[in-house]
Structures are given as structure tokens and as C-alpha cells.
């Protein structure tokens, strides 16, 4: 069992609830080289066992407004001390009813953040600077709800240019009250992401879906120096198992306080701390 406290800020328990589309199968087989168990139903005790083994105190479970996950809701209901939700699926083309639904979920359930990915809807035609995102930005800022956005080229064979983190430059400038986090790394635009993290106080980066031993030297240097409070751990379990990525994170050439921030403290402050509400 890991002796360090860990928050795993991106965990999937919904894959086994329904048949996955062909592009998801292609990601599993061709990109991650995963086995059939990657999309199998999740047993609560087995997940808690892996969390306990790796020192994971809390896990944030993905939950879609489009296809709600009964598994995620059940796990949150049974173990609210160990699980919270990340809500995706806001309809950016019809934002008013969708954002009302998001507000209701935030009111009624333990929601740690909401999320969207520019490559994964609208055929990748809408970069984060497009006006379709602005109602979501405003609502998240108003509620003090962190927003996570995919950055970096996506694994599936879909358009990826809209996930260049440079688009978030204007977003952070126009919405300094918005708690914004880049997720799934930023490859091949790591240096752009790091420069933005230095520039904007309200911006963070989560290394979900990235093996820690594959993180670039430039990010490790940033974590060690100016970015001690900027980078957050996430596994994207079961795509990457906690029992794989937590030991890899512990093996990074980082001071102990930086490791503690990366694995636990930064998420505790950004996702689980008091939620400032915009006036």
C-alpha cells in the first residue's frame, strides 16, 4: 500500500454499462493496446481495493448528462466519502436547458467539476474561443465550479487542432474568475501549456491518461520550480490502472513536497476545497 495520500481526479466506471462505439474500441485496441477488461463492468469492492492499495483517498467518476452512469451514481451514493462526480455532456448549442440541468446536478450531487472536449463534439469545428462555449464559461464562473477541457491531440482518429492549448489564452484572459484545468496532458503542445500555466493564476493541468514516466522533462522541471501548485494527478482508470501510474508518479525525480502536491494537495485545493462564487 502506498504511504502517500492520493486523489485520483479522473476515473471511468461507466464503460461496461453499454456496448462501446467502434471508435472507442479502436482507441482501446490500437492506441492503448488494452484488453477486453478495459470496458468490463466495474465491481465496487475491486475498485476500492485498488484505491486502498495505492493510497487513493478520493476518486472523481465521470458522469454524462447524455447517457447517465448508473454505476457512478451508485458508487457515490454508497461511498460518498470516497467518490464524487465529473459531469460532462453540456449541450453547447442549446445551453439554457442544459445549464439548468447542470446547476441542478451540482445542487443535488457531489460534483467536483464539469468537463468538455473540443475534439469530441461538433466534428471538432469549435475551438474553445468560439461563442458556443461562453455560456458554459460564465455559468461555471458564477457557480465557482471548475471546468476541465481536453488539450493535446486526442487518441481517437478525430480532428485535434481545436485542442491546442493556445486557444485557452483568450479564455483565461476573458474569464479570470473561471477555474480552468487542461486534462489529458497537452501533447505535442506541452511548452505552450506550461507558458499558459505560468501566465494565468486560474489555470491548471491534469496528467490523466498519461503514464507519469512518459511525461516530458519540461513539465517535470516546471513542477519542480514554478509549477508546484499547478499540476494535478489523474489516471483515466481503467485505461491506465492506478497500480501502474501511482508507483510511476512516486518514482519521478521530484522533491517530496512536490510529489505530495501533485498527487494530493493541488486537487484538494482546486477541486475539493471551498468553492468561490463569482459576484
Image: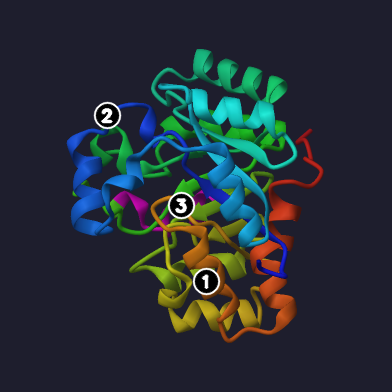
- Disc number lying in front (2 or 1): 2
Q: Nearer the viewer, residue 156 or 150?
A: 156
Bounds of the magenta span?
A: 162-173
Corner quadrant of residue 87: top right
What kind of secondary structure does the magenta stretch mostly adopt?
A: helix
SS class of the residue under badge 3? loop
Give the residue displayed 46% in from the left and 34% down from the top.
133
Spatial CA distance of label 2 from label 1 is 40 Å
Spatial CA distance of label 3 from label 2 is 19 Å
Q: Which residue is mark 1?
A: 195
Please determine whether, in this image, residue 61 is positioned above or below residue 256.
above
- Disc number lying in front (3 or 2): 2
Q: Residues within 10 Å of mark 3 (few under 14, many from 20)?
A: many
Give the residue displayed 47% in from the left and 66% down from the top.
244
Q: Which residue is mark 2?
A: 19
Res. 93 visible in picture? yes
Please determine whether, in this image, residue 208 is positioned above or below residue 214.
above
Amino acid at each position: 500500500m502506498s504511504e502517500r495520500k492520493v486523489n485520483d481526479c479522473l476515473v471511468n466506471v461507466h464503460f461496461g454499462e453499454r456496448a462501446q462505439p467502434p471508435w472507442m474500441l479502436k482507441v482501446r485496441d490500437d492506441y492503448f493496446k488494452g484488453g477486453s477488461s478495459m470496458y468490463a463492468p466495474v465491481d465496487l469492492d475491486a475498485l476500492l481495493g485498488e484505491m486502498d492499495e495505492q493510497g487513493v483517498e478520493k476518486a472523481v467518476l465521470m458522469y454524462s448528462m447524455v447517457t447517465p452512469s448508473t454505476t457512478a451514481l451508485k458508487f457515490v451514493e454508497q461511498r460518498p466519502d470516497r467518490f464524487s462526480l465529473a459531469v460532462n455532456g453540456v449541450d453547447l448549442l442549446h445551453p439554457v436547458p442544459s445549464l439548468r440541468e447542470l446547476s441542478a446536478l451540482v445542487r443535488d450531487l457531489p460534483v467536483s467539476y464539469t468537463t468538455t472536449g473540443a475534439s469530441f463534439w461538433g466534428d471538432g469545428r469549435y475551438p474553445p474561443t468560439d461563442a458556443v462555449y461562453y455560456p458554459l464559461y460564465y455559468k461555471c464562473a458564477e457557480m465557482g465550479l471548475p471546468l476541465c477541457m481536453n488539450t493535446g491531440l486526442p487518441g481517437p482518429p478525430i480532428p485535434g487542432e481545436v485542442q491546442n492549448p493556445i486557444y485557452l489564452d483568450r479564455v483565461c484572459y476573458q474569464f479570470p474568475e473561471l477555474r480552468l484545468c487542461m486534462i489529458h496532458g497537452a501533447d505535442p503542445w506541452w511548452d505552450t501549456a506550461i507558458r499558459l500555466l505560468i501566465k494565468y493564476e486560474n489555470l491548471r493541468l491534469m496528467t490523466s491518461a498519461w503514464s507519469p514516466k512518459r511525461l516530458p522533462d519540461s513539465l517535470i522541471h516546471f513542477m519542480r520550480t514554478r509549477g508546484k501548485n499547478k499540476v494535478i494527478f489523474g489516471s483515466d482508470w481503467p485505461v491506465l490502472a492506478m497500480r501502474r501510474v501511482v508507483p510511476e508518479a512516486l518514482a519521478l525525480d521530484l522533491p517530496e513536497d512536490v510529489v505530495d502536491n501533485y498527487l494530493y494537495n493541488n486537487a484538494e485545493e482546486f477541486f475539493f476545497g471551498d468553492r468561490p462564487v463569482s459576484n
